[in-house]
Amino acid sequence: MNHPARDVRSNEDLDTGDGRGVWPAATRAVTRIGRACVIEGLADFGPDDLNLVRGLFPARHVTLDGDVITVWPPPRP
C-alpha cells in the first residue's frame, strides 16, 4: 500500500511548526511497536536521515537498514 509523504501514519508530532517537520523528508510511516519506533521510507534513507533520528532519540540505539530506521527500546533495568 503506497502512502504519499503527507499521509504519514504516526502518533508522534510530525511538524515542529517551522516547516522542517520532525522526521526525514522521505518518511512514509512511523509505527510504534511496544517501546520501539519504526520509521519506514518511500526510498532508502541516508546517513543524514539516520543522524536526524539519532538526534531525536539521543539516549537510544538507532539503526538504518535501507528504507527502515529503527529506534530500539532502551534496555530494561
Image (tube, rainbow, N blue to C red):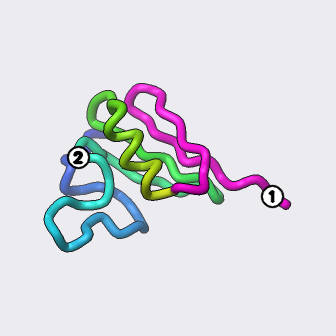
Q: Quadrant of residue 48?
A: top left
Amino acid marked by disc 2: Ala
Q: Is residue 30 above or below residue 2?
A: below
**Which circle's residue, 1 or 2, is located before the other in the chain?**
2
Mark 2, Cα crowd under 10 Å, few <14 / some 14-19 / many 20+, is some
Residue located beneath label 2 in the image: 25
Q: Which residues are magenta?
A: 58-77
For the C terminus, the quadrant is bottom right
Mark 1, Cα crowd under 10 Å, few <14 / some 14-19 / many 20+, is few
- Relative placement, left or right, of 11 versus 37 is left
Residue 69 lies in the magenta-colored region: yes
Label 1, label 2: how far apart the Cα atoms are: 32 Å
Residue closer to the observer: 76 or 43? 76
The x and y percentages for residue 72 are 62, 47
Q: Which mark is residue 76?
A: 1
- Relative placement, left or right, of 35 versus 30 is right
In the structure shown, which secondary structural element does the residue marked by tag 1 occupy?
Answer: loop
